[in-house]
Image: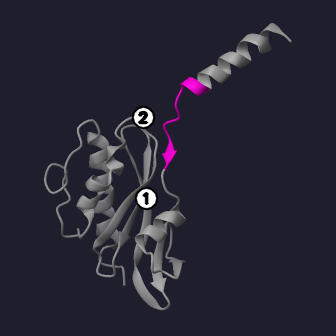
Amino acid sequence: MTDWVRFTLPAAVVASISSPAHAVQYLTVDAAQKLAFPAASRFVENGGLTWKAQAGDRLLGLFVVDHVIGKHLYIDYAVALDPAGRVMRVDILQYRESYGGEVREPGWLAQFVGKTSASPLKVGGDIRNISGATLSSLHVTEGVKRILATYGSRTR
């Protein structure tokens, strides 16, 4: 065994074990769709990363996947809208930052439920800021607001 293999390989293994991976996928798109619309019999692609959730021919709502920057890295999230354009659910699909993951807490995400394109959606106003995750809080809120502005009145 060469000195390079004897010393470099164990060091690489130790470094990979001691350096935690911060990118965590919490939900796949399929799993998030099923959580948002458990009664859906199918999801029909509606362009880009949007799907119409249907039960037979009945529209249950719209499911949108998007991403925003946390502080440095992307946060993938999904928003479920009912046919009237109200938020039914917001889920964090993947979080890559080493801190600020509190934005995926159910209590924080629940603040978006019932919001519409007419809602202020302002961190420090109708949406609580999370200390230590200020940029993630702000950017997820802005992302949900953008989705509502884009799709909130066009879910039918």
Q: Which residues are magenta?
A: 17-25
Which label number is shown at residue 98?
2
In percent of the image, x 48 and y 52: which residue is there?
26
Asked if the magenta segment contains residue 129, the reply would be no
* 10 Å crowding of disc 2: few (<14), some (14-19), many (20+): some
Residue under label 1, please give it.
66
Front one among 23 and 49: 23
| Farthest bottom residue in view | 57
Quadrant of the rendered image containing residue 65: bottom left
**Residue 119 image offset from top left, x and y in percent:** 18, 66
Q: Earlier in the sequence, mark 1 or mark 2?
A: 1
User: Callout 1: helix, strand or loop?
Assistant: strand
CA–CA distance between discs 1 and 2? 20 Å
Quadrant location of the C terminus in the rendered image? bottom left
Residue at the location (62% across, 20% down)? 14
Residue 25 in the image, given as x and y percentages of width and height:
51, 49
Q: Position of residue 88 (x, y in %)?
A: 32, 70
Task: Say which residue appears at 30% left-offset and 68% top-offset.
Answer: 148
Q: Nearer the viewer, residue 68 or 29?
A: 29
In terms of depth relative to the viewer, which is nearer, 96 or 24? 24
Query: Label for residue 38?
Result: none
Q: Does dot 2 land on a helix, a strand or a loop?
A: loop
Residue 125 vertical placement versus 23 (above, below): below
